[in-house]
Amino acid sequence: RMAAGSALFLALWLLLPPVGVGGAGPPPIQDGEFTFLLPAGRKQCFYQSAPANASLEAEYQVIGGAGLDVDFTLESPQGVLLVSESRKADGVHTVEPTEAGDYKLCFDNSFSTISEKLVFFELIFDSLQDDEEVEGWAEAVEPEEMLDVKMEDIKESIETMRTRLERSIQMLTLLRAFEARDRNLQEGNLERVNFWSAVNVAVLLLVAVLQVCTLKRFFQDKHPVPT
């Protein structure tokens, strides 16, 4: 019972956010995703705060608009240009380790004069200090008796589960972005097909009317028969 109770306590602690003893520390930066409309000929920038010595993954995708492309830049808090891409439909970039400060992400559609773009991007943070904190707590709560189940195995299993769940959420978000882009493409193709189909039908009707009028002129007798 003591082994099961210790294992349950460790599992509950790993699932709950840690509470500081001497005072509450800074709240962890949450992952985020955003979809926005970038007008033609415009540039839009976003700023994201990041802690020091962490991992930042920035992923973007153009899901709507002619060409499905955009210019992308990523700058560090010190103003150093980390990433610069031109006329790309999507991209994934990782910064590790990060600097404390605000990272600048810019999307540029100035090369397009008439087409606006629908852009989706996601920011994923992964703290590199989580493992050290977990190890410290593991030493504090480990009882003197030998446990039937090793704490290291429990930590490894829970960490693997957490990593797989986070990756599953990321993949689902990416699939939603792909689905939105494909839907926009299909709707655009449907509009073009309907438009040109209506043009073809109008042309066919016009040609049919002209043919009927031409045939009527051929069979009209303009000279009266003398009696």
Image (spheres, rainbow, N blue to C red):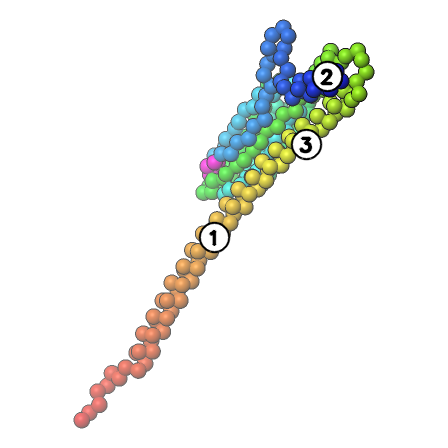
At x 50%, y 31%, the residue is 44
Task: Kindly check if marks 3 and 2 are in contact, taking CB atoms under 8 A apart as contact.
Answer: no
- Residue farthest to the front? 1
User: N-terminal of the two: label 2 or label 1?
Assistant: 2
The foreground one among 169 and 185 is 169
The picture places residue 83, in percent across and down from the top left corner, at 63, 31
Instruction: Name which residue lies at 64% across and 15% down.
Output: 18
Residue 13 visible to the viewer: yes
Q: Is residue 39 magenta?
A: yes
At horizontal 40% and vertical 67% (from top left) the residue drawn is 204
Callout 1: 10 Å neighbours few (<14), some, many (20+)? few
- Is label 1 or label 3 in front? 3
Q: Amino acid at mark 3?
A: Arg
Identify residue for label 3.
164
Circle 1: residue type: Leu
Residue, disc 1: 190
Say which residue label 2 marks: 6
**For the residue marked with disc 2, what is the amino acid?**
Ser
Q: Nearer the viewer, residue 84 or 135?
A: 135
